[in-house]
Image: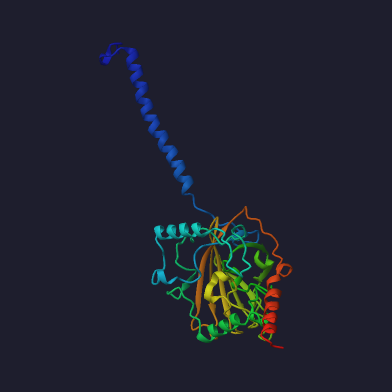
Amino acid sequence: MSPKSFGLPLTWRILVVIAATTMMILPAEAQVQKAIKTSSSTKAWTLARTPDGQPDLQGIWTNATLTPFERPAEFAGKATLTEQEAAALEHRASENRVDRPPKAGDPGNYNQAFFDGGSTWLSTRQSSLVVEPSSGRVPVKPAAEAQRDYDLAHVADSYVHHTTWERCITRGVPAGMFPAGYNNAYQILQTPGYVVIFSEMIHEARAIPLDGRPHLPPSVRQWNGDSIGHWEGDTLVVDTTNYNGKGMIATSAATARIRGIHESEALYVVERFKRVDGNTISYEVTIDDPNMFSAPWKVSMPLTKDANYLMYEYACHEGNYAMEDILRAGRAKERAAGQP
């Protein structure tokens, strides 16, 4: 073939071949890079396991959230919020997160630096932590609400009218898993035959056996009941019975009207922990106490892994000046009224 073939000089023909080859190579390389990125982003998450084969739930997990415990009236009939609604609520909360002087006669409360109740709605955008019944409202019996109201009206009379959290006994089970204004962290540890859930608030730990043992005899009753766990596939199921009837189903102010509702010895609680990705545990708890509620009800929420969270000791009794001061104020009020 002569240098004049195709009507182009040899040098030009060489340049054309190089350009054409480059154009073929670049798209191919782009396709490869795209495939690598796609493979990386869609790579399936693999559930890690402990040496003895349990699904690995270990780590520090948090559940601080703006999501209310029960569904507010403004979202009646609406189980899930839109992105815009959730964003608007988060914005409203951020604007209200300011320190204000207390009212006259009010000693005040913690400032905002001490609170850590969350700044975002749950990623699920559910309108409440309570998901069953479908109303998002706890089916409390009138007698249980009356007992709660009586306690609230008599907190200055005796410590027995305060929640078990205020008395530094326990936040309760499952109450200790419900988000509060701060210290919303839990460390999960696993050993052969046990799962331990260590709560930052009140600094208490639950050692849950997985060895198939039966519950304690009905004659043995405890503040937080008797918890026994087992695995259903990759879900840790913990059922708790044998409550002593002296605790409360919710002790945090974040639980609003459910705070201070008493438990009975008939309380039966089933919790489910399932790791759904590298940073999330799905937590569900079903509560059944026919003496306090007209039907069982369920709470559902994600627990989020936070490797940077530092858990500190919660020295409850050492700082519980409020209890003494409230009772002292009650006695002063009685003296002022001329009561013996």
Instruction: Give the quarter of the image for residue 251.
Output: bottom right
- Of residue 177 and residue 73, the one placed in the foreground of this image is 73
Residue 135 seen by the camera: yes
In this picture, is 213 found above or below 43? below
Side (left or right) of 46 relative to 1: right
158 shown above or below 208:
below
Colouring chosen for the image of the structure? rainbow
| Quadrant into which the N terminus falls | top left
Image coords of residue 182 (percent x, y): 60, 63
Residue 187 position within the rendered picture, expressed as x and y whole percent measured from the top left: 64, 61
Name the side, left or right, on which 143 lies relative to 242: left
Q: Residue furthest bottom?
A: 340
Res 262 visible: no
**Where residue 314 sits: x, y (%)?**
69, 64
Give whichever of 65, 197 is nearer the camera: 65
Res 2 quadrant in image: top left
**Position above or below: 262 against 208:** below
Between residue 13 and residue 322, name the one nearer to us: 322
Q: Residue at x 45, y 62 (%)?
A: 125
Judge left or right: residue 4 versus residue 117: left
Residue 272 x %, y %:
55, 69
